[in-house]
Image (tube, rainbow, N blue to C red):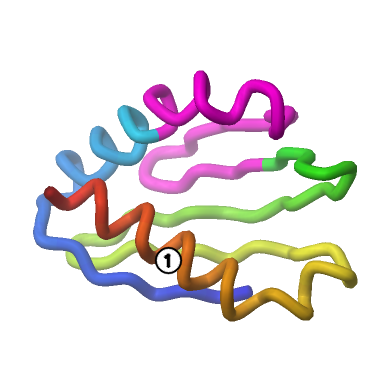
């Protein structure tokens, strides 16, 4: 899955928004998602988590005017890739308010 989502922040502000969004989301996800990896390397987040016994891995890169998300979805979730892309885009759009 590949997403390229525009944002209106500086790169530093966008990174801060992503980090805050992840912290804020943890209490809501605690019973549904196990975060295995969350590592920042400059402006790139490497992540891995398990949801519904399925592992999702990928990267989120924060550029000057857009977010780039590349994630490897489990085979059975690829059927819902459009819905997942829409949900991720909505979450990122929510960070821009």
In the image, residue 40 sits, relative to residue 94, either above or below, namely: above
In the image, residue 22 sits, relative to residue 27, either above or below, namely: below
In the image, residue 40 sits, relative to residue 44, either above or below, namely: above
- Find residue 61 and report its horizontal and vertical position in percent: 42, 56
In the image, residue 19 sits, relative to residue 4, either above or below, namely: above
Figure disc tally: 1
Q: Residues within 10 Å of mark 1 (few under 14, many from 20)?
A: some
**Residue nearest the viewer, comparing 27 with 56:** 27
**Residue nearest the viewer, comparing 52 with 74:** 52
In the picture of the structure, the residue carrying the numbered disc 1 is 68
At a point 68% along the width and 31% down the height, the residue shown is: 37
Q: Is residue 30 magenta?
A: yes
- Find residue 24 and report its horizontal and vertical position in percent: 38, 25
Q: Is residue 76 magenta?
A: no
Asked if residue 31 lies left or right of residue 42, the reply is right
State the extent of the magenta-drawn residues as a range: 22-47
Asked if residue 47 lies left or right of residue 24, the reply is right
The quadrant the N terminus occupies is bottom right
Helix, strand or loop at mark 1: strand
Residue 12 is drawn in which quadrant?
Answer: top left
**Residue nearest the viewer, comparing 35 with 59:** 35
At a point 65% along the width and 62% down the height, the residue shown is: 71
**Residue nearest the viewer, comparing 76 with 70:** 76
At a point 82% along the width and 44% down the height, the residue shown is: 52
At a point 58% along the width and 67% down the height, the residue shown is: 84
- Find residue 96 and report its horizontal and vertical position in percent: 17, 52
């Amino acid at each position: 899955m590949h997403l390229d989502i525009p944002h209106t922040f500086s790169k530093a502000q966008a990174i801060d928004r992503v980090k805050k969004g992840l912290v804020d989301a943890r209490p809501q996800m605690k019973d549904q998602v196990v975060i295995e990896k969350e590592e920042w390397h400059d402006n790139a987040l490497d992540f891995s988590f398990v949801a519904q016994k399925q592992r999702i891995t990928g990267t989120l890169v924060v550029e000057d005017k857009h977010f780039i998300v590349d994630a490897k979805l489990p085979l059975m979730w690829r059927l819902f890739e459009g819905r997942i892309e829409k949900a991720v885009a909505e979450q990122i759009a929510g960070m821009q308010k």
